[in-house]
Image: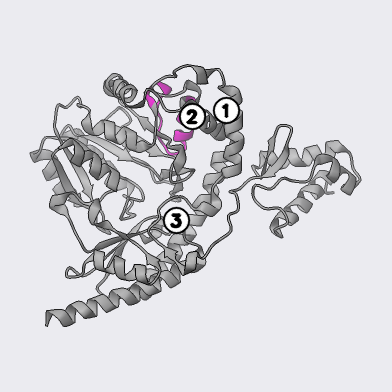
């Protein structure tokens, strides 16, 4: 026989399903529900307690209970614009209200700490929570080797300029890669050797040749959902790369900024194949939480702990205490796990739509990468076509895409690649956007052929 508190839960779930209670909304008070169901207050408390355990709702002291989920933002047409250029998190599914709750708790927890400087490598309580959370990704590291950073880019920027134990001076880097890493290398004047990432990945024989012939300090790789190609290495490829790094005394900087979104249950990071310190692991929370928080984590080898700590202190003394404290609360409460599970489904679904759309609407001879990631992908145009011209033409048609030219080191530059992201596009708009991109690409190809005659 169904218990009364279970009836209450069913009733609330129906209200949620029918849209009467939306993510972030306050639920009816305990007293109100007690009167509606003509039951004791303890029955309602039990119902809310069970829903809270299931991460469906959360409580705010003296305020009541709220539905877990991102704040609902009214979808706007932006004058018909379909934006494939913005690459932030899905704004309809960000945990604004929950994180506000965590920020409030952090202020209470760490109000005394705001009047003094904190630990350069991060709050010990947060580092403990990060150590537990990273285990979900098969990254097993003691708290002492974990550093909290102001976005993973801060860690990457420090690594670029920091001397490494192998005393080598050059960097091997995937091409293309994200703008900020390119800028870190160029502004430091460091010699970088590029290796091309295609839809099939990288040439491992060429990588070995580079490791053998060049004084490579580290190989920088985005091992899952690479930016901009969306490529993810297989476990076999990851293990092979780690073996090559060991053989030629090269370190690996593994940027696993979106590893949480990987739906492949047995997919391991490179770190899992050498947790001793050969692989330096970094991860960002910008793409799955709120970019403005600027929070990331790095797992360091013991040999780099002291120099990294000094460099981090010189850069910003420490990452803001309150944002660290809020992430600690968010991780400890189980909210992060529930949020990630929802995002995985969203991005996988968007990736499937994107993949079908590419195959249906791109002209023959036009190649693409990463459609299954649901976050980043590229379209490579025929060699005579310029990405800049296509970007400008699409903009006039209210379609925004990113010219990927700036994502290459100067000597490896390609001018016929565009980057797309479906992270901030409503699912119903993806196929129409790709269809219109396909039409415009076809026009440019025909125009280029006509001009070359």
Give the SS element for disc 3. Answer: loop
**Residue at the left extreme?**
213
Give the SS element for disc 1. Answer: helix
The circle on residue 355 is none
Left or right, 32 with respect to 222, comes to: right
Picture layout, residue 229 above or below residue 143? below
Left or right, 20 with respect to 123, comes to: right
Comes first in the chain, label 1 or label 2: 1
Q: CA distance from mark 1 to mark 2?
A: 8 Å
Comes first in the chain, label 1 or label 3: 1
The circle on residue 106 is 1
Residue matched to label 2: 324
Q: Is mark 1 in CB contact (under 8 Å) with mark 2?
A: yes
Residue matched to label 3: 423
**Is residue 276 visible in this depiction of the protein?**
yes
Comes first in the chain, label 3 or label 2: 2
Picture layout, residue 60 above or below residue 446? above
């Amino acid at each position: 026989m169904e218990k009364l508190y279970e009836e209450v839960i069913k009733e609330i779930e129906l209200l949620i399903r029918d849209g009467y209670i939306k993510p972030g909304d306050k639920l009816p008070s305990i007293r109100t529900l007690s009167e509606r169901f003509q039951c004791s207050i303890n029955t309602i408390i039990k119902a809310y307690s069970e829903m809270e355990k299931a991460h469906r709702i959360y409580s705010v002291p003296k305020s009541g209970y709220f539905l877990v989920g991102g704040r609902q933002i009214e979808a706007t047409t932006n004058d018909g614009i379909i934006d494939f250029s913005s690459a932030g998190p899905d704004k309809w599914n960000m945990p604004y209200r929950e994180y506000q709750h965590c920020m409030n708790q952090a202020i209470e927890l760490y109000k005394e700490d705001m009047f003094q400087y904190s630990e350069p490598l991060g709050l010990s309580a947060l580092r403990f929570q990060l150590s537990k959370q990273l285990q979900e990704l098969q990254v097993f590291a003691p708290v002492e080797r974990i550093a909290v950073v102001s976005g993973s880019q801060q860690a990457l920027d420090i690594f670029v300029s920091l001397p490494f134990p192998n005393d080598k001076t050059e960097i091997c880097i995937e091409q293309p890669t994200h703008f900020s890493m390119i800028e870190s290398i160029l502004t430091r004047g460091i010699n970088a050797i590029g290796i091309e990432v295609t839809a099939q990945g990288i040439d491992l024989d060429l990588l070995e040749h580079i490791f053998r012939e060049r004084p490579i300090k580290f190989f920088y790789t985005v091992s899952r959902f690479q930016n901009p190609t969306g490529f993810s290495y297989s476990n076999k490829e990851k293990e092979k790369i780690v073996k090559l790094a060991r053989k030629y005394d090269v370190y690996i900087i593994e940027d696993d900024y979106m590893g949480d979104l990987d739906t492949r249950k047995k997919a391991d990071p490179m770190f899992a194949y050498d947790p001793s310190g050969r692989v330096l692991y970094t991860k960002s929370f910008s793409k799955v939480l709120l970019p403005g928080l600027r929070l990331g984590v790095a797992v360091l080898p013991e040999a780099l702990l002291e120099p990294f700590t000094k460099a981090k202190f010189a850069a910003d003394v420490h990452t803001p205490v309150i944002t660290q404290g809020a992430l600690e609360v968010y991780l400890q409460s189980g909210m992060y796990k529930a949020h990630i599970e929802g995002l995985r489904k969203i991005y996988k679904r968007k990736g499937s739509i994107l993949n079908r759309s590419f195959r249906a609407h791109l002209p023959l001879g036009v190649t693409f990468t990463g459609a299954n990631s649901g976050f980043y992908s590229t379209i490579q145009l025929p060699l005579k076509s310029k990405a800049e011209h296509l970007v400008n033409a699409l903009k006039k048609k209210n379609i925004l895409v990113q010219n990927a030219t700036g994502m290459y080191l100067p000597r490896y530059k390609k001018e016929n690649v565009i980057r797309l992201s479906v992270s901030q596009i409503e699912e119903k708009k993806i196929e129409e956007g790709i269809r219109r991109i396909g039409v415009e690409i076809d026009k440019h190809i025909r125009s280029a052929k006509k001009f070359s005659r």
